[in-house]
Every structure is written in structure tokens, then in C-alpha cells.
Amino acid sequence: MEVPRLDRALSSPTSPCEEVIKNLSLEAIQLCDRDGNKSQDSGIAEMEELPVPHNIKISNITCDSFKISWEMDSKSKDRITHYFIDLNKKENKNSNKFKHKDVPTKLVAKAVPLPMTVRGHWFLSPRTEYTVAVQTASKQVDGDYVVSEWSEIIEFCTADYSKVHLTQLLEKAEVIGGRMLKFSVFYRNQHKEYFDYIREHHGNAMQPSVKDNSGSHGSPISGKLEGIFFSCSTEFNTGKPPQDSPYGRYRFEIAAEKLFNPNTNLYFGDFYCMYTAYHYVILVIAPVGSPGDEFCKQRLPQLNSKENKFLTCTEEDGVLVYHHAQDVILEVIYTDPVDLSLGTVAEITGHQLMSLSTANAKKDPSCKTCNISVGR
């Protein structure tokens, strides 16, 4: 069943209720809380016996919607005119205690056949835990409501961005990813101890690790995809990698064709900024048929390696030629182990600019360039 009419979506005072999906109408109403407390002018009548929802089920969860259904006793069921849905973000024990609390969202839906869809990007965020409870109500001729007791509280978690959402993000990134520069190597900066550890404990091969939570909150690769981060940006005047890095004074360099060639697939992973004027694009390179490739095929938009706005591999006179986008900062994830013997490790002459690190960096949710309207 598609979304019912919502008489009111109470979120923050500035919630864009006018964006409620098609055919929804608004009606002012105040709700009691889950404990049944009401203000003196609440407009809700004293509680009468209405069936209490139980055995609540959540299904068809996306990053900004879900379907909800429940069971009810048949007694007085024909008097139900509305459902009250109390939706709240689950409290995070590690959240910043100085941050303003999220305003609870109470939805008033006309009674329709179940399940019904709840959708709204201003009060549902991707990959976020929520609690939900339901109340049945009967609207009286004088405008007051008779309500049941609240149901039990259940928990659920919204989903990651789908391929459709990531394609929208990709299209936004393509707008600013035009000019291309030639390059010849991928590189990875780390501390000397990192490379010593790789030699001693991993047989000289850098191992994929789980990507951190930097970038878009709804990105399906955060905390899930395993890979090795590389850069490929070059300085405009030299055509070589910059001598500064936020990640360590030792750099592993490897010829571009060792990682990116006709035997690999290229995927778009994310587009974000960190309250700065410049933007980051995350790309994933996966050997064809590898576990990383299978992971990405199911979740990420695939790019044409020969023709896209960010990273290309073309053949000229029998030689592979590589270009990267100049106007965005590329972060490239390679999904297989990489042996240090395939490249070189050397100390850079520049500085370690820690302020440029993107480790667990949070995306600016207010940036119009790199956000889509399905949560952040």
C-alpha cells in the first residue's frame, strides 16, 4: 500500500512539510507522548477503549523510507480514523552531550489498509537507528481525538544509499569534475612503522582493511568495503605527486598500469566535502571477478574506465595512458592486496599536513554542491 495521507509531520519547526509526498494534506494537531501525557489544550479527548497496535513489523526499509504494519483486536476497530506514529532517533551513548537533541517526529496518518509507507528525507537519515511506537485514534465531530494506549516500542535501522541515490550523487560530482591531467603513478603515504610492519608480518604485501566512516553518511562502502587507499593527484606545474601529505612521510609509488588496467573495473563510491571549498570523490578499482568487484557490482555505479569525468585509462599507440580530474581530490580504493615489490618506498621531502587528513571526516550536510535530498 502506498503512503497514506499525513495530517501532520511534526519534526523540527523548520521541517519542509510541503515536501511530503504527493497527495498529502496538513492539519494542525498536538499529540500526547508515549506515556499518555497531554497539555491542557491538546485537543485530544480522554482515553477510551480503542485497540492497541501490537506485533509491529517494519519492512521495505530504504535510506529515507520504510513500511510499517501491525495487528489489532477487532473490537472497536471500525471507529479508528487515524494512526499516530511516534518516531525517534535511538539515543547514542557516544553522542556529543552539548549538541541539541533531535526533535521527535510524530506522524498523524489517516487509517488505511496496512502496511503503509512512511517517507521523508527531513526526518529519516540513512544508516540510522530509530525507535517507533504506534497509537490508534478516533477523530470526534468536535475535532478532538480519542486515542488508544501506545504500542510497544520497537527498533530498526535505515539502509544505505541505493544505486539510484549514488547515481544522483555521481551526477552532482560530474558537474565539477571536468578538467583532466595526465599521471603515471598511484601512491600511498604512511609512517615508516607501517611499511616495516607490512614487511615483517604480511610477507611484504599491503592488506585491504575496512574503509572508515568518512564521507557521506549513507555511503554503502563506509565500514563495509575492504581496500587500500591510494592517491593519484599531481601538481599542475610538474605533473608529479605533491611532496606534502597528511598521512605520513614515507610514500609507496606504483605504476598506474599495475592497479588500473583492462582487467579491472572502476566504480563511483562517494562525493563529499568537509566544510571546505574543494570536494572529494571516492573511486573503487577492483580486479574483475574479485570479492571486491562482486561487492561493488551490487552496490555502486560502474564507470567506463575509458571515458568518465574522474579517472581514465586509454590506449595510445599501444601504451596505456592515464588522466585524473584536476578540480576534485580523488581518493582511490584498490580492493586486493598489493605487494611492495611492485613499487618503491621512499621518504618525501615535504611536510606532513595533518589538517588535510580525511580519516573519519564528516560530510558537510549543508553543502548544496555535494548533497542529495535523501538524508546525508
Image (tube, grey):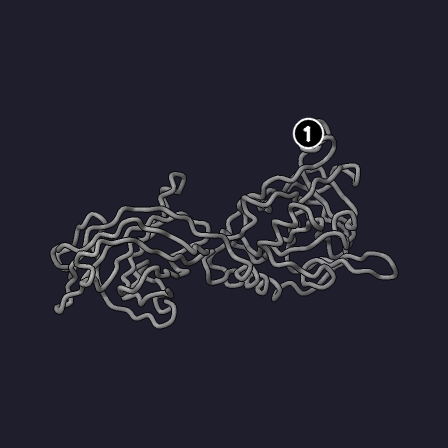
Residue furthest front as drawn: 74
- Rendering coords of residue 152 (x, y %): 27, 46
In the picture provided, is 335 more to the left or to the right than 272? right
- For image coordinates 33% across by 46% down, the residue present is 154
Categorize mark 1 by other alpha carbons within 10 Å: few (<14), some (14-19), many (20+): few
Q: Secondary structure under badge 1?
A: helix
- Rendering coords of residue 219 (x, y %): 53, 52
- Rendering coords of residue 56 (x, y %): 32, 50
- Rendering coords of residue 225 (x, y %): 59, 45
Question: Which residue occupies the foreground of this view, 80 or 308?
Answer: 80
How many marks the image carries: the answer is 1
- For image coordinates 32% across by 53% down, the residue present is 87
In the picture provided, is 263 more to the left or to the right than 5? right
Which image quadrant for residue 67?
bottom left
Please name the amino acid that badge 1 sits on: Tyr
- Which residue is denoted by mark 1 in the rendering? 197
Residue furthest bottom as drawn: 23
Taking 270 as reference, is 94 above or below it? above
Which image quadrant for residue 30?
bottom left
Residue furthest right as drawn: 317
- For image coordinates 72% across by 45% down, the residue present is 187
Question: Which residue occupies the foreground of this view, 32 or 235?
Answer: 32
Taking 174 as reference, is 262 above or below it? above
- For image coordinates 84% across by 61% down, the residue present is 316
In the picture provided, is 29 more to the left or to the right than 222? left
Quadrant for the N terminus in the image: bottom left
